[in-house]
Image: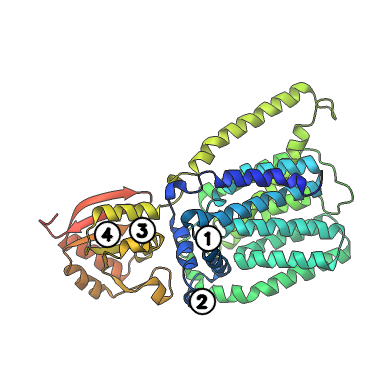
Amino acid sequence: MSRGAVALFPAALMLVLGLWGIRRQDSMWRDEAVTYDMAHRTLAELWPTLQTVDAVHGLYYVLMRGWFLVFDGGVVALRLPSVLAMAAAAAGVTLLGRQLVGRRAGLFAGLVFVLLPMVQQYAQEGRSYALVCALVVWSTYLLTRVTARPCKRLWAGYVALSLAACLMHEFAVLVLPAHGAAVVLSGLPRAVRRAWCVAAAAVIAGLVPLALFSMGQSEQLSWLQWPNPGQLGTFIALVLGGLLCSRAPVGRAGRQRLRLRPVAFPLLVLPTALLVLLSQLKPMYVDRYVLYYVAGFALLAGAALDWVLRPPGHRGQTRRKVLYRSAALVVVLALLVPVNVFLRSPQSRTDDAIAVTHAVRELSSPGDGLLFLPARRRVWAAAAPHEFHRLRDLALDRSPVASHTLYGTELSGDHVHAHMMQARRIVAVGDTKGQPLDGTDQEIAKRTTLSASFQACATREVKGASITLYARPGHC
């Protein structure tokens, strides 16, 4: 089987699973709403926005702007690039496994990658993480090729893909320590190690301008706290699984210079571990920022499955062993089905901007006042801005587009209070109970005025949000 043919099945399977339930009942969570908004701004509007916020995602927004000019198909168009990127990543993981171990191990690695819940989740999100994952996987593949047969063209391709990944999201740079560890641990010739150092330096040099500029926007990560226990638990489980899989005997394929474990294990461990360590200085750990680490686990698991499922009589394998191991594999796959079904529901994400829009439409009448508590929840309106035009945003000073921001700018607390006192009915769109309250004068003015001068008439709770209709006493 040719090098490319072995990658077709995992890529095709990823396409099928990515398209399955891609609409998620037409839901859209807040980060996707940001993408949808930014990708529908003109370049003249987008450029000044990136100078104040979200520069780290600037390249992705520009690409999505071009994509929506070609295909503006709502949530399907929003998520389709991620599906295609994950299909490319699945093909890359397959070829990596083939390069490092063999054809069967590569095929199994690609299938494991496709079936991982994290891959399923971000294949259906309108954000940059699937594209970053694909670029990192293919840069890793080029690294295995160029170290086996060095040439300037392959080194240039490696630099281009690595730099593109870093410009798509800066934390892709954390793959470079993993690549460096692979080069060192594999005992490659000094000339190859020197060439990799030059390539890595070129990638870092290309990233430095964006990194320095985006440091001025670091307040965007102020919402992050200590790493999420669930996300850390997933990482630890995959590392332990990778350690278990690495115990399977693995041969070397042909004349390859890089080996499986020195490539896969640093890729699995180092990016996340480094991000957790950096979070001790300033919280910045979210697992999707280093999503590509799951490729390391897939490579180790693919090699282990190749050994586990070898035919009876092959190096001590018995028919009973193969049957038991196959049954265990079927059980694991069956356990993944409910998870993958859940990931295609609106409840699988933090919130649902479309559900918020429907609740606002149900509770409001034309001319009612509108408040977002806190102001950053105005991002929910970005999913369907036309639905909010019939209401009066009582706190808004300049719209997100006019102010070159994500959420717009608001009036002072006194002006917000004055506008609220002129309204008879107000629809308040905010977080569910138990979330921390912002202490700005605008947010204090909203809460105190609603409490003192209005009464709650009706409330709708949707995923991640609470929408309440307030009216003057006696006017519910």
Three-letter code, disc 3: Pro
Tag shown at residue 436: 3
Lower sequence index among marks 3 and 1: 1
**Earlier-in-chain disc, 4 versus 1:** 1
Q: Amino acid at mark 2?
A: Trp
The reply to whether dot 4 and dot 1 touch (C-beta < 8 Å) is no
Up the image or down, 288 lies above or below 63; here it is above
Say which quadrant the N terminus sits in.
top right
For marks 4 and 2, give the one nearer the viewer: 2
Q: Residue at x 59, y 52 (%)?
A: 83
- Residue closer to the observer: 80 or 47: 80
Amino acid type indicated by mark 1: Phe
Mark 1 and mark 2: span between their CA atoms? 22 Å
Residue at the spot of label 2: 47
The residue under label 4 is 428
376 above or below 118?
Answer: below
Give percent across and percent down for residue 246.
Answer: 74, 42
Question: Can you identify the residue that label 1 sits on?
Answer: 71
Q: Position of residue 214 (x, y in %)?
A: 55, 73
Residue placed at 74% from the left, 67% from the top?
A: 159
Give how far apart the Cα atoms at labels 2 and 3 are: 32 Å
